[in-house]
């Protein structure tokens, strides 16, 4: 029987996906907090929700079951009867391990029903919501005017990043920036307690109790034995070696990890912002990641002796992929047709961040019309989703979705 998580490619027909509908957290961004919260602008929430509902509907219309992170999290907390312990952990990671402010926040959050509490944790807790004057040193000495006790998590609608499905399991990620680190606690709880996922023999290939960072936007499942992982602003080489060792030592089916080095900046924070797989032999690539002569640093990692790793350095992306995936040829489709203005503009709005829902069928943002046209010319079926507000968070259809089950490729 198919496990509740089963993903052996980037392109197999998408049967089950997890999304998070953007909510109040997005309205709790201010110009001052934008950079720290990893946004470049403040989305207009009602339109962002409309766009997100449009995205979800496209997936449903094409035969995908859509689950929502916020609902799964509340159901898991209730099923496991872990509201109090979950809150303690969330409060500790929000800076309130003990003391009067921990107690006041906990009392307030415990008084909400579980779904409202989960929604509130995403939205953030404002100081004026609770009738409580903090007496601790942090509140007094650091920023007495800061409006939040607990920060919002506006990036939660990018469900791709806090965890990543690989084979019959997942990585639950230690994320790079404080703005996102608490997000992966929800998936940890879902896997541990939700009746759909708990005790179903799912592997956690790497959990969140690490100091080295990894994010799902860098983790690409190229086949049932090959992964590509970006060495990026968000994922360290140490974490890649770590997860490779775990995958190779367990019965994961994975024996190859291609580490791909990309520039470390906000526009290209993850590998999936510059490179995605869209068909058995087709990929989108942002030309900006390729250096002179189309070169890029990749290291193909395999199991070595006694749990060690072997590594082969290459600079020809096409050749590396062809050999790892056993293909005669492949088609690398440049974002924005490789034009020096269009390519960076459309990459900025996630023109390379396509979500394949079946081999050769992709969901993309409508605004990247040059890239979309290119994809059509290369024979892909392109389903466009509306995108003026969602894209302000710097993520596209791949970032906004965590595939849970895909059909295996034949
Ligand atoms: N898989 C992705 N490319 N995710 C995009 C995440 C964007 C988000 N604002 C961040 O900086 O974390």
Image (cartoon, helix red, strand yellow):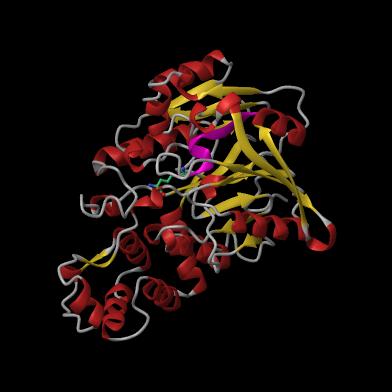
Q: Is residue 38 above or below residue 347?
A: below
- In this picture, residue 362 sits left or right of residue 405: left
Along the viewing direction, whichever of 304 and 158 lies nearer the viewer: 304
Q: Inspect this view and state whether residue 111 appears.
A: yes
Q: Residue 193 at what x, y percent from top left?
A: 55, 68
Q: Which residues are magenta?
A: 270-280
Q: Residue furthest right?
A: 305
Q: Is residue 238 magenta?
A: no
- In this picture, residue 35 sits left or right of residue 236: left
Q: Inspect this view and state whether residue 349 appears.
A: no
Residue for point 70% across, 33% down: 321
Q: Residue furthest front?
A: 292
Q: Residue furthest bottom?
A: 99
Residue for point 42% across, 33% down: 350
Q: Residue 217 at what x, y percent from top left?
A: 51, 45
Residue for point 24% across, 52% down: 29
Q: Is residue 73 above or below residue 298?
A: below
The image quarter in which residue 198 lies: bottom right
Q: Residue 352 at what x, y percent from top left?
A: 49, 31
Tally the marks: 0
The image quarter in which residue 103 lies: bottom left
Residue for point 37% across, 58% down: 179
Q: Residue 157 at what x, y percent from top left?
A: 40, 48
């Amino acid at each position: 029987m198919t496990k509740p998580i089963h993903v052996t490619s980037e392109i197999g027909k998408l049967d089950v996906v997890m999304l998070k509908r953007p909510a109040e957290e997005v309205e709790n961004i201010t110009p001052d907090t934008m950079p720290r919260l990893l946004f470049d602008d403040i989305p207009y929430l009602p339109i962002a929700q409309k766009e997100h509902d449009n995205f979800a509907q496209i997936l449903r219309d094409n035969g995908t079951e859509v689950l929502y992170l916020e609902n799964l999290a509340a159901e898991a907390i209730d099923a496991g009867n872990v509201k109090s312990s979950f809150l303690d952990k969330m409060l500790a990671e929000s800076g309130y391990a003990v003391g009067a402010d921990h107690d006041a926040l906990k009392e307030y959050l415990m008084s909400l029903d579980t779904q409202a509490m989960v929604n509130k944790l995403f939205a953030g807790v404002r100081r004026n919501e609770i009738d409580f004057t903090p007496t601790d040193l942090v509140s007094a000495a650091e920023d007495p005017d800061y409006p939040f006790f607990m920060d919002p998590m506006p990036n939660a609608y990018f469900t791709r990043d806090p965890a990543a499905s690989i084979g019959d399991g997942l990585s639950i990620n230690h994320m790079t920036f404080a703005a996102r680190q608490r997000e992966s606690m929800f998936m940890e709880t879902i896997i541990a307690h939700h009746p759909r996922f708990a005790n179903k023999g799912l592997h956690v290939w790497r959990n969140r109790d690490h100091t080295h960072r990894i994010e799902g936007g860098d983790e690409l499942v190229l086949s049932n034995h090959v992964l590509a992982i970006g060495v990026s602003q968000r994922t360290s080489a140490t974490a890649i070696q770590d997860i490779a060792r775990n995958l190779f030592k367990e019965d994961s089916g994975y024996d190859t990890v291609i580490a791909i080095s990309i520039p470390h900046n906000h526009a290209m924070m993850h590998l999936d912002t510059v490179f995605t797989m869209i068909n058995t032999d087709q990929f989108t690539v942002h030309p900006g990641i390729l250096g002179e002569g189309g070169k890029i640093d990749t290291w193909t990692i395999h199991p070595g002796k006694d749990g060690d790793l072997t590594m082969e350095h290459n600079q020809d992306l096409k050749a590396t992929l062809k050999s790892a995936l056993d293909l005669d040829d492949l088609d690398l489709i440049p974002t924005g047709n490789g034009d020096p203005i269009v390519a960076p503009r459309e990459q900025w709005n996630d023109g390379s961040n396509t979500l394949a829902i079946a081999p050769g069928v992709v969901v993309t943002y409508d605004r990247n019309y040059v890239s979309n046209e290119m994809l059509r010319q290369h024979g892909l079926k392109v389903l466009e989703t509306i995108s003026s507000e969602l894209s302000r968070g710097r993520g596209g259809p791949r970032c906004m979705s965590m595939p849970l089950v895909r059909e295996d490729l034949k």
